[in-house]
Structures are given as structure tokens and as C-alpha cells.
Image (cartoon, rainbow, N blue to C red):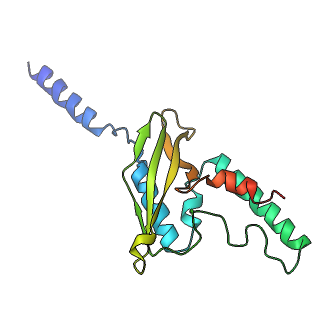
Amino acid sequence: MRRLQFATAVSFVLLAAIPAHAEPITLTPEQVGQIFCISRVGNDMAPVEGLLTAELASAIAEAEAVDAAWAAANPGEKPPLGDGIPWQSYQDYAAICTAGAATLMMDEASVPITYAFPEWPDAGFTDYLRLRLVDTGVIGYRVWRIDNLAYGTDGDLRSSLRLAFMP
């Protein structure tokens, strides 16, 4: 009987010593939206670069390369992306940016990004981050990444990057 009790106690001790499987922590779509807003208000999109899908990052890099070539070929003229990457419907600086609640659609999410101007309360607008779940290479672990930005007015970031260089 004592051996059985001892074996049971040892089993519990050994089981307690096994490390638990750590679940990776991923950002929610709303958190991605909050990081996007902080970057917009701070006028520094570097934190967002790591949150882009490979496809969107590639489209931006290609547009920047074409823009640099255009600027070199046309010195003294404002290049098509002279105001930078069009991260929002209007290029005016908005002092307030708020990420709203995400709408989930299977492996995609839409996060409303609302901009406001304290000096002009009626001048605000809303764009929408389009997120996609992306595989990380770790089986069963996917993360939310920005795949596009739909403008509240018309169009989207990917289209704007392509159209910027059309004659």
C-alpha cells in the first residue's frame, strides 16, 4: 500500500515538473488597429512595417523604388509619392486616430480607423484596415497582418500605389 502511495506521489511530482505548452500570444485585429493609429498620430509608420503582409510590403517597396527612379529622372519636380505612402484617405495630419471594433470574416478582419481634427469637428473621416490571418511557419500559429487599407472615400492603398504612376 505504501508503495502505491509513494508511486502516486512521485507521479504527481513528475507531472508537475513537466513544462506546460506555452501558447504564443498574437495581437488581436483591434490591437493592430491601435498600433496603426499610434503610428499615424506619431507620424512614424516604422512600427507598422512589421505588421504588413509580405504582399503589401512588397507592393510598397516596389512603389517606393519606382518613385525614387521617377524623382531621379525628373529633378526639381514633385514625385508621384511626394507626400509619402497614402496611408489614409486624406494626407492632412489628424491629431486624433481611433481604432474601432473589428468585423471578422473567417480569416479576414476589417478594423475601422477613424480620424478626427479637434479644430474642425465635422472634418473627420473613417478608413478601414483590411487584415488577413497569415501563417508564421509554426504549425497552427497564425497572426493578423495588414493586407490593405480601404479608404472611406473611394479606392484603397494598393490601388493608389499602382495608379500613382499611371500617365
Horizontal side, residue 12 vs residue 32: left or right:
left
When the figure is inspected, residue 36 is found, relative to residue 15, above or below; the finding is below
Q: Is residue 48 above or below residue 58?
A: below
Q: Is residue 140 above or below residue 121?
A: above
Check the image and name the residue furthest to the front: 122
Whole-percent x and y of residue 106?
A: 45, 33
Give 22 or 99, whichever is nearer the viewer. Answer: 99
Q: Depth check: give the residue in front, 3 or 163.
A: 163
In this rendering, position of residue 83 left or right of residue 110: right
In this orientation, does residue 12 appear?
Answer: yes
Q: Is residue 149 above or below residue 86?
A: above
Q: How many labels sit on residues?
A: 0
Q: Residue at x 66, y 51 (%)?
A: 158
- Residue at image location 75% in from the left, 58% down from the top: 63
Which residue extends farthest right? 73
Q: Quadrant of residue 90?
A: bottom right
Residue 11 occupies which quadrant of the picture?
top left
The x, y position of residue 61, in whole percent, is 73, 58
Whether residue 27 is visible to the viewer of this picture, yes or no, is no
**Nearer-the-camera pick, 133 or 96:** 96
| Quadrant in the picture for the C terminus | bottom right
Which residue corresponds to the image point at 16% horizontal and 30% vertical from the top-left?
9
* Residue 75 rendering spot, x and y as whole percentages: 88, 78
Query: Residue 67: x, y in percent?
Result: 79, 65
* Relative to 70, 144 lies left or right: left
Q: Quadrant of the N terminus?
A: top left
